Amino acid sequence: MEDVVTSRSLFPEIEPFKISSLKVSNLHTVVFEEVGRPDGVPAVFLHGGPGVGILPGYRRFFDPKFYRVILLNQRGAGKSTPHAELHQNTTWDLVDDLEKVRSHCKIDRWIVFGGSWGSTLALAYAQTYPRSVAGLILRGVFLGRPAEIDWLHKFGASEIWPDVWAKFSGYIPEAERGDLVAAYNKRLTSSDPELQRTAAKSWALWESSTMCLVQDHSAISEMADSASALSIGRIECHYTHNRFFFKSPDQLLENCDLIQDIPCRIVQGRYDVICPVKSAWDLHKVLPKSELRIVATGAHSPMEQPMAQELVRATEDFKTLP
């Protein structure tokens, strides 16, 4: 289904009523916020990247008079510590962290809301702990398949943003450009902090420049120069270099039999350059009970109005879940 969205926009800005930390391993401590009603219907927001961390705007997709929303900074991201740490940082570590946070918060089941990498993690979590998930809201679907990785880092997105691609690929010497992910990973795991910083900035610039239908140059510069750039570059490249730690390329699609009865809304921008529509379509085909909303003027960013409105519509519709 393709929608020109007419529903309401984001909810007003809101501050957390609680900020907590939880030690999830001998190395990592994750920090998470709670917004809305302490006794509200529980939901968890999964940020992208991996490595982006929680931003204030992410609190605004949910009615604060109805939901209790947990916004979790994944390992190494946002306020979680140690910052940009790669050790003990895999998909399955993050999956287990979610279950630890759910148990810590004394939540029986929650709605899982995730976009981009957050959709990947949401699916991996739901397939591992299906009884913990009341519903799935997925945006900008990414399944971690080689074709999706190659689209973003070899050939595909480069054809739509050749000017931005020239800067991203041009950061790496020509002799190493046959495998940009490996070349960036080498620099992002270097013992030289300045080399890590410049490589992370280049990586973050590529992704932030391709997120929106219309570029927001001030937001792009702010992201590339922020402390988050290091965690985005290091952690995202680490996961990409390791094929997102899946046992098989189609693992998330192959395991969808485990989540057939979980209500699922897929919100996908027609012009999403980072996570093209085909992944959402492929997921919808193996989850026939899911509802796919293709936003006619949507791209990758959840904050642009067409996507934001459709995501708010999803959280409003999910108020009626049993």
Image (spheres, helix red, strand yellow):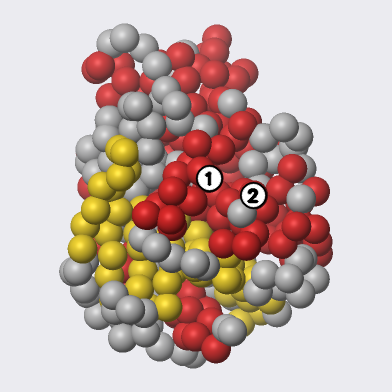
Q: Residue at x 41, y 25 (%)?
A: 86
Instruction: Work out whether residue 254 or residue 163 is closer to the camera in this orientation and state it.
Output: 254
Q: Position of residue 142 (x, y in %)?
A: 61, 50
Instruction: Work out whether residue 145 or residue 45 is closer to the camera in this orientation and state it.
Output: 45
Which residue position is annotated with label 2?
128
Give the left or right position of residue 129, taking residue 74 as reference.
right
Q: Position of residue 63 (x, y in %)?
A: 35, 82
Q: Position of residue 242 (x, y in %)?
A: 59, 26
Taking 16 as reference, is 312 above or below it? below
Q: Is residue 312 visible?
A: yes
Q: Residue at x 58, y 44 (%)?
A: 157
* Amino acid at pointer 1: Val
Q: Residue at x 55, y 10 (%)?
A: 175
If the image is split into quadrants, where does the C terminus sit?
bottom right
> In the image, which disc is placed on residue 308?
none
Which residue position is annotated with label 1?
95
Label 1 sits on a secondary structure element that is helix
Q: Position of residue 300 (x, y in %)?
A: 50, 59
Q: Are marks 2 and 1 in contact (CB under 8 Å)?
A: yes
Instruction: Work out whether residue 41 or residue 161 is closer to the camera in this orientation and state it.
Output: 41
